[in-house]
Image (spheres, rainbow, N blue to C red):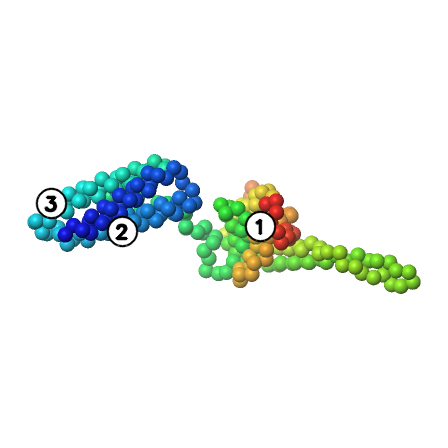
Amino acid sequence: MVGPLNGAIGDITGAASELENIPFIGPAIGAKLQRTMRGINVAQAKVGQVVAMYGRATSAVSQVQERIGTLKEQASKASAAINRVAGKINPSLGNIVPTGSFASQTTPAPEAVKPFPHLLIIQPLKPEAQPYYFNLDTAAFDELRRQTAFRWAGQERLTRSIAQQAVGLGDDKLSLKGSIFPGFKGGLKQLNTLRSMGRNLQPLSLTTGYGEVLGNWCLLSVDEEQSNLLAGGIPRKQGFSLEFVSYGDDLQNV
């Protein structure tokens, strides 16, 4: 009659034992904690089923309550182990910590969610770095220029015209030109955000709004022109131009 509850206690006891053996939190251990917490959630669901089935039966109440006490004890043990290895965690659902406590922040940035496609997306290569979205609300550009060079060396020949010898590939450059209207939506800090990305001196991945991956690029310069100044020197319009150069196919020294 209390078989499901005994199974739940076995599940959570195993979970507590695993948690006590975890010395620190890392990517692999975070996944292990999530698997362990899923077992605890299954155990909690089994408890609810048992109570619903036997809660009205007088002969079963004492047995159910006894096993529930054991389950709470093991749940407290598991929660204490998690608090020990993970730091500040807020237990919920009767001392059972949900899997969501270990999940990273999944809410996207406001500029990432728009009813219209992005013009361009800059993604730093560091996983923890935030991307930058070019759209009508941030830094909108209306001109994109790409220049790809190929290197040839002229070879002089006696009594003949100069012959060309291929020696390698040249620079692949990309330039953007656009305008920001701070009083509309963009704000005054858009170009500062781009400058901060350039100061990191790290390659940036560029992806168009229609999904084409342009590869890894280096931000060479950020030019700004302010016009139609308001009171306090606030610009009504910020003209800007960005210049990128292709980093190359490899990712050495990143």
Question: Which residue does the image show at 44% across and 51% down from the upper left?
Answer: 108
Q: Position of residue 202 (x, y in %)?
A: 59, 45
Depicted 81 relative to depicted 237: above or below: above
- Tell whether label 2 touches label 1 (CB within 8 Å): no
- Tell whether label 3 touches label 2 (CB within 8 Å): no
The Cα atoms of the two marked residues, 2 and 3, are separated by: 23 Å
| Badge 3 amino acid | Ser
Q: Which residue is mark 1?
A: 204
- Tell whether label 1 touches label 3 (CB within 8 Å): no
The Cα atoms of the two marked residues, 1 and 2, are separated by: 43 Å
First along the sequence among labels 3 and 1:
3
Q: Nearer the viewer, residue 23 or 131?
A: 23
Depicted 161 relative to depicted 12: above or below: below
Which tag is nearer the camera, tag 1 or tag 2? 2
Which tag is nearer the camera, tag 3 or tag 1? 3
Question: Which residue does the image show at 32% across and 47% down from the upper left?
Answer: 37
Of helix, strand and loop, which one carries label 3? helix
Q: Residues within 10 Å of mark 3 (few under 14, many from 20)?
A: few
| Badge 2 amino acid | Val
Of helix, strand and loop, which one carries label 2? helix
Q: Nearer the viewer, residue 87 or 197?
A: 87
First along the sequence among labels 2 and 3:
2
Q: Which residue is mark 2?
A: 42
Q: Position of residue 251 (x, y in %)?
A: 60, 49
Question: Which residue does the image show at 62% across and 51% down from the upper left?
Answer: 250
Q: Which residue is mark 3?
A: 62
